[in-house]
Amino acid sequence: MHVVHCRRTREEIALSRKTKPNSKNGLKATKRSITSAGETFADGAMIELVSGSSGFDKPDFLLWKGRKTTIGPHVEHGGCIYEVPELASSLYRATRLPSRCTDYGSARRLFAGIADVFKQHLDLPERESSLLACFSISTWLADQLPSAPSLAISGPDQELGIDVLRLFSCVCRHPLMLAEVTPVGFRSLPTQVSLTLLLDQQELKPKMQRLLRASKYRGLHLPGTRGDVIDLYGPKAIFCGNDAAVDTLGDGVIYISVIPSQLRSSPLDEQVQDDIANKFQPRLLMYRLKNSGRIRESRVDGSEFTFATRQLACTLGMCFPEDSKLARDTVQLLRPQDKEVRGKRSRDVNCAIIEILWALIHLRTQRQVKVDELAKDVNVLLQSRGEIIEYSAEEIGWKLKGLNIQRHSDRSGRQVLLERETSQSVHRLAQAYDLPCSQRVEAGCPDCNHTKTTLSK
Ligand SMILES: [Zn+2]
């Protein structure tokens, strides 16, 4: 994987730059003409794609300067003329653009309105509807966030899963619904426009999982086929019938399980979808215009969450700079998901090894532990937490190698010396894995004290 650091977002990179003669008053002035899919300027002005009035599969531009809004096939700002790119007509028809921007009242009102859409049309519970609203709003600010929000939906009813994606296509930014995407298809997706990908994937093969994980990070490009690089950073919602596959998407993903309800109201026909989109797309565009430059103002403390959820909590919290209470309430919606992470972590073999070594180091009754003794203790601990897999001494040896904990051999077999170097590694690992033991300071332990003082700096 090539890692390329790029200071500008994809939309800010003009697709082509050329100069255009301007013969106004007979003077030979030139104005730069830039083809672009959107721009964010240092003075706070922004250019956004809106649905075109020409009717020729071509979007228009909306130039926003705080109080003044201009719409047209090209707009002028800072001495340059910006022109909309040619989009494949199939893409233009498959995605959705707002026609204008309009006042949204308050962040709280917009949020509640979108959550209501999921409640009303799919009869989803409050927490799930609110998380879906939160994801929808985050897609409008994704290009400003440190990582793109991802959402995984699981559930037994494919029709319901697809209906969630349909509603997303009304309220997310530049939505594109796709089914059964392969790695090759994924790499050939159009990149001129920042899309919110809405995927129906009944299968998620390892290669596809890796690509989806990589595209969460801004600045991480994928190698192209012609010596070029592809930027597929962007928000994604994935409906996957297979719960196990959903789990493989990794940390920093909002997980939602949707259960069919008997009380589902009217079907989601095109007219219903258009009405929802016409109501919310212009409001959400205004939300983007007003809040894009403010997301750094929003600070949510995610320290109460596990490492796996913390970054996601902070990223989602950033999406509500104008209402810090709404940001905090939204982040709390991740609590049940985080609890599950903690439960899984307690059955993680690496965590069990660190916990046992931590206990032995602080007991100070022995100077070494044999790897097969350690394996027995790890298995007992894991079984007490409901794990059914049993690890051999050899497997525990490999895990120790992975954790970079030194093993030594003597006549009695492989062992771990419980000396200072091991203690330092175990303390660092306990901290990194966010284990409950790392919260304690054991009396007389220099490494406990050291970890605490380093953290408080
Ligand atoms: Zn200690």
Image: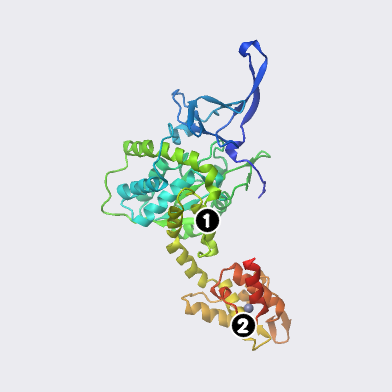
Marks 2 and 1 in Cβ contact (< 8 Å): no
Name the secondary structure under disc 1.
Answer: helix
**Please, what is the three-letter code of the amino acid marked with disc 2?**
Ala
Asked whether residue 58 is in view, the answer is no
Q: How crowded is mark 2: few (under 14 residues within 10 Å), some or many (20 or more)?
A: few
Percent of width and height locating residue 234: 53, 45
- Residue at 51 percent of width and 41 percent of height: 195
Q: How far is the residue under mark 2 from the one under mark 1?
A: 34 Å
Foreground residue, 243 or 455?
Answer: 455
Q: In which quarter of the image is ligand 1?
A: bottom right
Q: Residue furthest front?
A: 67
Q: Which of the numbered marks, if any, corresponds to residue 314?
A: 1
Foreground residue, 289 or 15?
Answer: 289
- The answer to whether the residue bearing label 1 lies less than 8 angstroms from the nearest atom of ligand 1 is no
**Please, what is the three-letter code of the amino acid marked with disc 1?**
Cys
Percent of width and height locating residue 119: 32, 50
- In the drawing, does residue 303 fall left or right of residue 369? left
Q: Quadrant of residue 15?
A: top right
According to the picture, the residue beneath numbered tag 2 turns out to be 443
Percent of width and height locating residue 353: 59, 76
- In the drawing, does residue 355 fall left or right of residue 258? right
